[in-house]
Amino acid sequence: MSADKKGKPEKQHKDRSYDGDAFIAQFALRGAREIIILDADGNTLRSTVSPRRTFVYVSSLKPLVTMARNVVRDLNPSNDVTFMRLGSNGGEVHITLGADFILIVIQRIKRKSGTQK
């Protein structure tokens, strides 16, 4: 531990840098199969799927996110969409909308062995 000019010990700062691998691993532990992180403009920052599949997801979900935001703002201009959850027979899509990013998490639902369609 070092000291500053006045003889007081310097404060240790925690490293608050973004660790993408740890971030994605945490979601994977919770059952996420595919994770896509976009910037506010919709450009891919990080993805755990192929570029082609990433393009398909982003090109399908980006207009939906825009429409959802418009609907919420039309109903009440002081509100904004922060989270969307879409479900289907095969899985769920969770979309988190931040000011600087969009996080898309795709989960596959495991069917019970006795379930028939």
Image: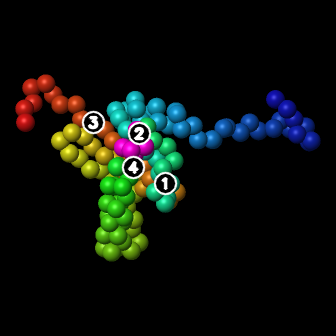
User: Within 10 angstroms of label 4, few (less than 14), some, or many (20 or more) residues?
Assistant: some
**Which residues are drawn in magenta?**
49-55
73 sits to left or right of 5: left
- Residue at screen point 49% across, 58% down: 40
Q: At label 1, which amino acid type do we have? A: Asn
The answer to whether the residue labelled 3 contacts the one labelled 2, judged by CB atoms less than 8 Å apart, is no
- Residue at screen point 13% across, 24% down: 113
Instruction: Give the labeled residue for mark 1.
Output: 43
Instruction: Give the labeled residue for mark 3.
Output: 108
Q: Is residue 68 visible?
A: yes
- In which quadrant of the rendered image does the C terminus lie? top left
State the separation of the CA atoms marked 1 and 4. 10 Å
State the separation of the CA atoms marked 3 and 2. 17 Å
Q: At label 2, which amino acid type do we have? A: Ser
Q: At label 4, which amino acid type do we have? A: Phe
Using the image, tell me which numbered label, if any, was put on residue 50: 2
Q: Secondary structure at mark 2?
A: loop
Percent coordinates x, y for residue 98 in the rendering: 47, 56
Using the image, tell me which numbered label, if any, was put on residue 55: 4
Q: Would you place residue 85 above or below residue 90 in this image?
A: below
- Between label 1 and label 4, give the one nearer the viewer: 4
